Amino acid sequence: MAESVFSWINPKLELRDTGKHGNGLFARENIRKDELLSVFGGYIMTRREEELLPEDYNDTGIQISENLVMTVRERSELSAADFINHSCSPNAGIKGQIFLVAMKTIRGGGVGLRHGALSWQRGNAVQPGLSLRRTELP
């Protein structure tokens, strides 16, 4: 996967196959609670414009307003930051609109990042190995 021109991930993270749900981000080193994990970027488009993108990446955008998302236009623009696994017991969440932070200490050695957000589009839960959606931090 090419280096992203839009997003940044903490160098303590690595992208690898989950063995079950496609790609996911994993902690190589210990990560402190509240440590910045990723900063998201991309093109601004309407939800409808995003839905018209090819099916394999038409739901990877981050919602930034009721009808606008920040996303990629081409599959080649996806980055490691676009692969956060969903979980009912998350260890990462969105702070503001574009920052992913650790919600608790994450031990290194291959612990996967998990968020608890639900997709705001089409009412479906985010599928493991795909991009995250709005997650509210406590």
Image (tube, grey):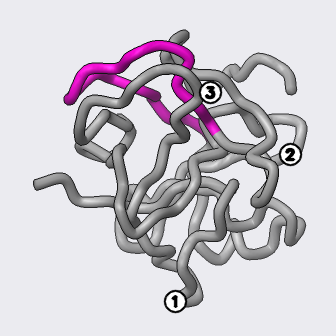
Say few, some or many: other residues with alpha carbon within 10 Å of mark 1 (under 14 / 14 to 19 / 20 or more). Answer: few
In this rendering, the answer to whether 74 lies above or below 55 is above
The quarter in which the C terminus is drawn is bottom left
Residue 138 left/right relative to 38: left
Q: 37 or 8: which is nearer to us?
A: 37
SS class of the residue under badge 1? loop
| Residue 10 x %, y % | 49, 16
SS class of the residue under badge 2? loop
Q: For residue 92: magenta?
A: no
Q: 39 or 28: which is nearer to us?
A: 28
Say few, some or many: other residues with alpha carbon within 10 Å of mark 3 (under 14 / 14 to 19 / 20 or more). Answer: some
The quarter in which the N terminus is drawn is top right
Of the numbered discs 1 and 3, the one sitting upstream in the chain is: 3
Query: What residue did someone put label 3 on?
Result: 6
Q: Which residues are magenta?
A: 25-42
Which residue is most to the left?
138
Give yes or no for contact between labels 2 and 1 (Cβ–Cβ under 8 Å).
no
Query: What residue did someone put label 2 on?
Result: 74
Q: Residue at x 57, y 70 (%)?
A: 126
Q: Amino acid at mark 3?
A: Phe
Q: Residue at x 47, y 20 (%)?
A: 108
Residue 19 in view in this figure: yes
SS class of the residue under badge 3? loop
Q: Amino acid at mark 1?
A: Gly
On the image, which quarter does residue 135 sit in? bottom left
Q: Residue at x 76, y 39 (%)?
A: 78
Which numbered disc covers residue 123?
A: 1
| Residue 41 x %, y % | 54, 34
Q: Amino acid at mark 2?
A: Glu
